[in-house]
Amino acid sequence: MTGGAGFIGSNLLLYLVPKYPGYLFINVDCLTYAGNLANLKPIEDYPNYTFEKINICNLLAMQDCFARYDVNSVIHLAAESHVDRSITGPAEFIQTNVIGTFTLLELARQRAAQTGDFRFHHVSTDEVYGSLSASGFFTESSPYRPNSPYSASKASSDHLVRTYHNTYGLDVVTTNCSNNYGPYQFPEKLIPLMIRNATAGLPLPVYGDGKHVRDWLYVEDHCRALDLVFHSGSSGQTYNIGGHNEIENVKIVRKICRIMDEMLGGEPRERLITFVTDRPGHDRRYAIDASHIQEELGWKPSFTFEEGLRRTVKWYLDNEDWMENCITGQYLQYYEKMYSNR
Ligand SMILES: NC(=O)c1ccc[n+]([C@@H]2O[C@H](COP(=O)([O-])OP(=O)(O)OC[C@H]3O[C@@H](n4cnc5c(N)ncnc54)[C@H](O)[C@@H]3O)[C@@H](O)[C@H]2O)c1
């Protein structure tokens, strides 16, 4: 697995490693600001888990890793994943998301030619489809219309993956998922950022009018879907994954405030909501039609948004040390740059 020390990767490894003792999981991660090995403490001593600090763009190091472990499949999550960062500094997004994916595909192609057996599972996002108006859903055949350097880099990687199936016959599956939330998410993303700021009594910065709509999925439900698609998805297929849970950003922030008020008491936290200048090219609405994965593989989300959000808030409140350890000087500088002049 690549990117196993990030948010979704950590949740996925914590789910898969105990479940599949007969597999060897190699977590390949170069530990950017978003990677945190402390997330993986519960499984770090499992005999079927190991960590390799490698940048996926490093062809020779990755080639050596594939050969040493006789790798026969990849679940590819390593990425630069934050839209705002892609606007201020797109180069790393092209490097990791496009060149990194290309590097892995080339190695997968070589291995498949040698062994005849290699599955490549590419983990992607619904942001590749662009923005929807008030109605309609993204399906697997929606046109690609990315609007940020992040979504454009993910769209490029999706195209490369499809190409390796159609041109070279590589066994690939791609999943395009909506916004995830849950434990271990870096506090630059909406939900943990709001929980942290509300805990500290800081302003809760909401972009524009706050009416941008996203579909939200609890990360554990995404992990179950990835497990299913990796094991049972049809080669060459794309699966959209979503929670059928569309909600405006500002409503999420209000819900978080309400849950925190209930859990912690004190002055109502909604008063901390502050509307700030919108993100350039901010997509208005995303909504996913997840009927393909439901019909073919029997997957559907198991957590309601209310349940998932309560669990998430509780996790961050119980793990304040984790949150504070994430927040390095570098992150604070980034935060200042993003929000101080809006
Ligand atoms: N978070 C979401 O809501 C969401 C939704 C849909 C799809 N996705 C996709 O899922 C994947 C994982 O997302 P996430 O939220 O866990 O991201 P994340 O930013 O939390 O984690 C990314 C991980 O990749 C590692 N990484 C980055 N560049 C690397 C490189 N060059 N070599 C090796 N490792 C590198 C980082 O160290 C980090 O551990 C991404 O591909 C993302 O596009 C995320």
Image (cartoon, helix red, strand yellow):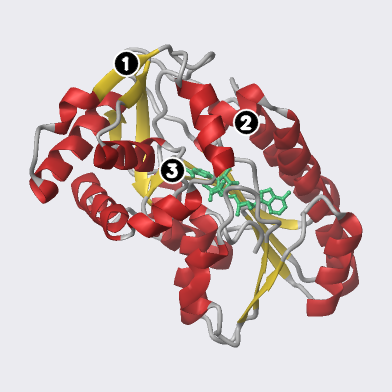
Relative to 302, 230 lies left or right: right
| Residue matched to label 1 | 275
Q: Which mark is residue 64?
A: none
Residue at 27% in and 25% down: 250
What residue type is disc 2 on?
Tyr
- Image marks 1 and 2: residues in contact by CB distance under 8 Å: no
| Residue matched to label 3 | 187
What residue type is disc 3 on?
Pro
Q: Is residue 181 above or below residue 153?
A: below
Q: Is residue 81 above or below residue 51?
A: above
Q: Is residue 138 above or below residue 41?
A: above
Work out how far the residue at label 1 is from the one at label 2, CA to CA, in angstroms.
24 Å
Residue 49 lies, in percent from the top left, at 61, 79
Residue at 77% in and 71% down: 117
Residue 295 in sight:
no
Work out how far the residue at label 3 is from the one at label 2, CA to CA, in angstroms.
18 Å
Residue 160 lies, in percent from the top left, at 76, 41
Work out how far the residue at label 1 is from the one at label 3, CA to CA, in angstroms.
19 Å
Considering only order in the chain, which callout, 2 or 1, is on the residue closer to the N terminus? 2
Secondary structure under the numbered disc 2 in the rendered image: helix
| Residue matched to label 2 | 150
Between 3 and 114, the one nearer to me in the picture: 3
Question: Can you tell me whether the CB of the residue at mark 2 lies under 8 Å from the nearest atom of ligand 1?
Answer: yes
Relative to 198, 47 lies left or right: right
